[in-house]
Image: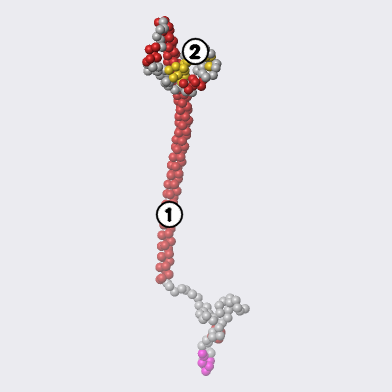
Amino acid sequence: MSASKYTLQCNAHQCRVKLSGFAWVTACSHVFCDQHGSETFSRTPSVCPACSNMLSGKLDVLRTELAPSEQYKAMVLIGLQPETVLEISHNALVFWTYQVNQERLLMEYNLSRAGGQVLQMEKFMIQQNQSRELELNALRAEIASLKKGLEEYKQKYNEVLERLNERNRQYQKLQGLLDSLRMHTLGIGEKDPTPHTFTTGLVKQHSPHSPSFLRPEGDRFFSLGPDNSQSFFQFNTPTRDRTHSFMKKN
């Protein structure tokens, strides 16, 4: 990383903001933003928030302008010995080198930490994939079992359907036979419509006043009406000629 393109950042872990304007620098080569430096170094004795070193000296902590004016840069080192100028420049370069190295180390630390997190995530993802694969295999086995059961049910359904169709055919056949027997019976009845009855000599009464058998009003099994009582007991004997004898005399 080129030093001309590098921008100092606040060394406070909770801040890490890019510095501009005024900043606080320490003898231990740390730098802080104006806000955190004012809060931290306003107390005595001061302690560096980055490395916890005691900053008890008068010049151990300085508030400096990061972008000084041209007049300041022209006058700040005038009159100093070349050795002093070189020493000051060396110390300034050491500070910058330290800051760049610290930033590089911090970036490497963050990178390694991120790499560890990535490895953990990869391990976690592998475990999750294995678990999902096991679940998927179990689901596939269950689906295969269900398909097998479905095929068995389809086979049983086809068998039952075939038996049902066979029963329906038998039923239709029996129904046809029954219909033919009924037609045959009706044909015989039409040829001989007179029923064969036995005459008993009793006259069936169609009058609404005629009694019926086992009538609940009387004590008799049956009774005859007044018009038919005489005719029921009257015998029609043939008339004989009283002048002739029953037997012929020789």
**Mark 1 or mark 2: whose residue is earlier in sequence:** 2
Q: Position of residue 39 (x, y in %)?
A: 51, 21
- Kind of residue at disc 2: Leu
Q: Indicate the quadrant containing the N terminus: top left, top right, bottom left or bottom right.
A: top left
x 43%, y 61%: residue: 178
Q: Where 186 sits versus 10, above or below?
A: below
Residue 116 visible? The answer is: no
- Kind of residue at disc 1: Asn
Q: Where 230 sits versus 1, above or below?
A: below
- Residue 147 falls in which quadrant of the image? top left
x 54%, y 84%: residue: 228
Instruction: Give the camera-side residue of 195 and 20.
Output: 20
Instruction: Find out whether residue 117 is within the magenta segment.
Output: no
Q: Position of residue 167 (x, y in %)?
A: 44, 53
Q: Which residues are magenta?
A: 239-245
Instruction: Find out whether residue 244 is within the magenta segment.
Output: yes
Q: Position of residue 216 (x, y in %)?
A: 60, 76
Q: Secondary structure at mark 1?
A: helix
Question: Which label lies toward us, 1 or 2?
Answer: 2
Q: Position of residue 29 (x, y in %)?
A: 47, 14
Residue 224 visible? The answer is: yes
Res 63 label = none
Judging by the rendered image, the residue that carries numbered circle 2 is 59
Q: Where 131 sits versus 147, above or below?
A: above
Mark 2 packing: few (<14 Cα in 10 Å), some, or many (20+)? Answer: few
Instruction: Give the camera-side residue of 111 and 209.
Output: 111
Q: In the image, is 230 to the left or to the right of 74?
A: right
Q: Where 137 sits versus 183, above or below?
A: above
Instruction: Give the camera-side residue of 210 and 90.
Output: 90
Res 168 label = 1
x 49%, y 21%: residue: 36
